Amino acid sequence: MNTKTKRIAIVCLIGLIVVVAFVLGINFMNKPNDSEGPNEVSGEKMSSITIRVNDHEYKVKVADNAAAQEFASSTPFELPMIELNGNEKYYQGSDKLKAEEYNPGHIEAGDLMLYGDDCIVLFYKSFDTTYSYTRLGWVENPEDLEEVLGSDNVTVIFTKN
């Protein structure tokens, strides 16, 4: 095979991968990636925020989308979060964020998501899901998050780093 034929084969293979990803609905843009750089909204870089529950603090990596940046740049605030399903805490607000929903297929403990355009969800257990969310971020070290959040409603304080 000559060089020109090899190049054509590589371009065709890349094109096929892109088409298959599109048909399957794979969205690589909203997946967490620890190598992502800081994000910008209104000139302010927001790559992480902190959440505080009782005496425990967790660093949250902010996702690279408009809703996540708007959420992070509006900190500090505290949210009274309600227990649901033994795996999450949620806050149903009145302020709307720009949703960019996708179905992650699997939720990890520590995922911070937006359900719809006004419901903030903090997951403390991992599980498979068929629901769609907009990723706001993820707790970098969620090992004791389930224990700290407990099984009751809780107030979570969100602050800028």
Image (tube, rainbow, N blue to C red):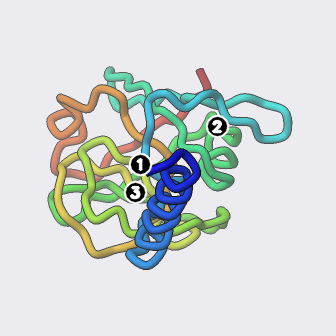
Query: Picture quarter containing residue 45?
Result: top right
For numbered disc 1, what is the local secondary structure?
Answer: strand
Query: Label 3: few (<14), some or many (≥20) within 10 Å?
Result: many
Q: Amino acid at mark 1?
A: Leu
Query: Label 2: few (<14), some or many (≥20) within 10 Å?
Result: some
Q: Residue furthest bottom?
A: 23
The residue shown at (60%, 48%) is: 68
Query: Picture quarter containing residue 11?
Result: bottom right
Q: Earlier in the sequence, mark 3 or mark 1?
A: 1
Q: Which residue is labeled 1 in the image?
A: 112
Q: Which residue is labeled 3 in the image?
A: 121
Q: Earlier in the sequence, mark 1 or mark 2?
A: 2
**Distance from Cα at disc 3 to Cα at disc 1:** 6 Å
Mark number for residue 75?
A: 2
**In the rendered structure, are the residues bearing label 3 and label 1 in contact, judged by CB atoms less than 8 Å apart?**
yes
Q: Amino acid at mark 3?
A: Val
